[in-house]
Image (cartoon, rainbow, N blue to C red):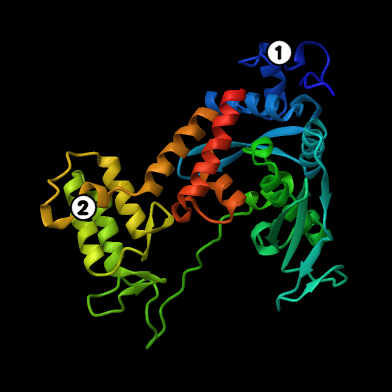
């Protein structure tokens, strides 16, 4: 079986040794909906992805979809294919490796947690489960309907999600399972079924007056109020905020000692819209500042005690992701391993680093 990417004839054909888009290819991409807001790094990563997956953007096998990002104040482009594209890649890989590929029966779950091997209800299922079997090894994945359903501005389910909710949920579960079974080959590209929810409108905040005797849900907590805010410890959050504002590693180490003494290291805090474990965040923040370390006898906290192997493994993983052109590492890691990077162990971080290192070396 040929390993060439050249599916399209003529000047649009992508060569395996190509490093930049040709003027003809760039013009065709722009005609297909990619505007001037796309970043050069996104275009370069897309070319590498097309070469690695051997999917042809000019035959509409793979797309680069732009969506507005409020944090970056611009469109952010994400590679996207269909579940059929995933299947093509999977079958191509197992054929080349002389492996086997199979599926177990799809299961659907209702809101009570009961599983069915066929979904007959007119209501949408709560979740679907797909198990991909690659060379005898099982890769199970569960997709929740609520996490992927596509809705319109009036919060009404739209598109195929309104017509075939069981099928669409199963496709998302299959995509998750295939990406676990083929992490190198499918890293960095998502299916249209998974990304439909990315176009959901932002929820509106409806304002109304606080009624007499009713607590104001938006009021700033006072010193005598509960020390827990939406499941997060307020003292832990204050230490995290202190570390975020710090410009000296010593301040972060003081916060770490305080958290350790008060038993707060495992508390969840919010940092830049992400929920993280306080201890892991303080270690990462301290390493980020990289100030001269205090002497080992300073309050009994040594550099060896402050250094976290998982934090070091995460740094190596992020470096490998940058080298491989994977710009959505956090999303890809959670989809592949079922947990955020901040909660992962050294073994999982090292495994993903090896996969991405292999991807960069093969490019």
Is the residue 184 above or below the residue 133 in the image?
above
Q: Is residue 222 left or right of residue 180?
A: left
Taking the spot 38% from the left edge, 42% from the top edge, the residue there is 312
Percent position of residue 168, x then y: 78, 56
What is the crowding at mark 2: few (fewer than 14 residues within 10 Å), some, or many (at least 20)? many
Residue that appears at 43% across and 43% down: 314
Task: Give the number of marks.
Answer: 2
Residue 24's label in the rendered image is: 1
Q: Earlier in the sequence, mark 1 or mark 2?
A: 1
* Residue 349, placed above or below residue 4: below
Q: Is residue 16 above or below residue 332?
A: above
Q: Residue at point 20% right, 39% down?
A: 291
Q: Which residue is located at x 77 percent, y 19 percent? A: 4
Q: Nearer the viewer, residue 64 or 335?
A: 335
Q: Which residue, given by chain and number where applicable, does mark 2 sit on?
A: 253
Q: Which image quarter: residue 65?
A: top right
The image shows residue 38, relative to residue 212, as above or below, that is above
Compare residues 109 and 31 and report the one nearer the observer. 109
């Amino acid at each position: 079986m040929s390993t060439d990417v050249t599916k399209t004839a003529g000047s649009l054909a992508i060569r395996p040794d190509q490093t930049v888009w040709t003027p003809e290819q760039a013009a065709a991409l722009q005609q297909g909906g990619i505007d001037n807001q796309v970043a050069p790094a996104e275009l370069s990563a897309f070319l590498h992805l097309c070469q690695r997956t051997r999917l042809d953007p000019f035959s509409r096998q793979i797309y680069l979809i732009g969506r507005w990002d409020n944090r970056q104040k611009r469109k952010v482009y994400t590679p996207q294919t269909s579940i059929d594209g995933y299947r093509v890649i999977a079958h191509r890989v197992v054929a080349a490796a002389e492996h086997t590929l199979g599926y177990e029966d799809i299961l659907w779950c209702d809101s009570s947690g009961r599983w069915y091997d066929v979904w007959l209800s007119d209501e949408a299922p709560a979740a679907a489960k797909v198990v991909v079997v690659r060379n005898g090894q099982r890769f199970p994945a569960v997709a929740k309907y609520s996490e992927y359903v596509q809705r319109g501005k009036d919060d009404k389910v739209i598109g195929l999600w309104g017509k075939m909710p069981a099928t669409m949920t199963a496709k998302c579960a299959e995509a998750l399972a295939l990406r676990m079974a083929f992490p190198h080959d499918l890293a960095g590209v998502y299916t249209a079924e998974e990304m439909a929810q990315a176009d959901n409108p932002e929820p509106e905040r409806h304002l109304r007056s606080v009624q007499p005797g009713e607590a104001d849900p938006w009021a700033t907590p006072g010193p005598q109020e509960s020390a827990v805010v939406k499941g997060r410890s307020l003292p832990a959050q204050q230490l995290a905020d202190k570390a975020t504002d710090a410009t000296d590693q010593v301040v972060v180490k003081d916060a770490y000692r305080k958290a350790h003494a008060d038993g707060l290291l495992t508390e969840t805090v919010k940092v830049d819209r992400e929920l993280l474990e306080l201890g892991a965040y303080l270690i990462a923040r301290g390493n980020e500042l990289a100030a001269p370390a205090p002497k080992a006898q300073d309050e009994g906290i040594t550099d060896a005690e402050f250094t976290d192997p998982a934090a070091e493994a995460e740094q190596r993983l992020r470096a490998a992701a940058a080298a491989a052109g994977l710009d959505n590492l956090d999303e890809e890691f959670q989809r592949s391993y079922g947990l955020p990077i901040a909660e992962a162990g050294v073994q999982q971080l090292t495994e993903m680093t090896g996969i991405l290192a292999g991807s960069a070396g093969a490019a």
